[in-house]
Image (cartoon, rainbow, N blue to C red):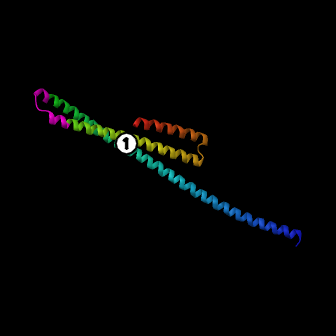
Amino acid sequence: MSKLEIDLNKIGNLQAEIKILESRKLEIERGADKIRTEVIKEKRQGEQDLAKQKEDFKNEIRLREKGFKKIEKDLTYQTVDLRKKEQEGRDLDKDIQAFNKKKRSFTDKRKAIQDLKSNYIDREHKANLLITQYKKMIGELPQDKVVKKDKEVKKEAKKTTKKKR
């Protein structure tokens, strides 16, 4: 074989390799597009879920606060009634016990709301961490800024957990 035939053979082999590499490149690009669309769908779903949880939480707090206002109003009226009964010289032991029981249940419910608020803050913190991780993953945020935000969020979470204790 002459040098020209060898060179032509090499060129043919290189062209075949180029076609193979180009087809692999296209497959990789298609896979990357599929992954991007899946990530975007998951992000949207996560944001929708988070918004729904926030709205549900706000509605639950509103309902409980309405209930607490009613309980406080009832307790105020009961206190006035108890004072009247005291002045009249009636036996108030049973009424006082019932009043104290309602008062304890009221404080228990108030504590439950505080626990719900702290759980909401924890969920929101986790969601913010996931969002920053996602942004870091897709490159919307530079690495050093993400690290600073994560540190700030962690400090804030520590403060809220200390307040709970």
Residue 84's x, y, as percent?
14, 28
Residue furthest top in the image:
87
Q: Based on the displayed image, in which of its 4 quarters is residue 21 positioned?
A: bottom right
Tell whether position 24 is magenta.
no
Q: Nearer the viewer, residue 55 or 101?
A: 101
For the C terminus, which image quadrant?
top left
Is residue 15 visible in the rendered structure shown here? yes
- Which range is magenta? 85-98
The amino acid marked with disc number 1 is Leu
Q: Position of residue 128 (x, y in %)?
A: 49, 43
The residue where tag 1 is placed is 116
Query: Is residue 88 shown in magenta?
Result: yes
> Extreme bottom residue here?
1
Label 1 CA crowd tier, 10 Å (few <14, some 14–19, many 20+): some
**Secondary structure found at label 1:** helix
Q: x, y (%) of residue 125? A: 47, 42
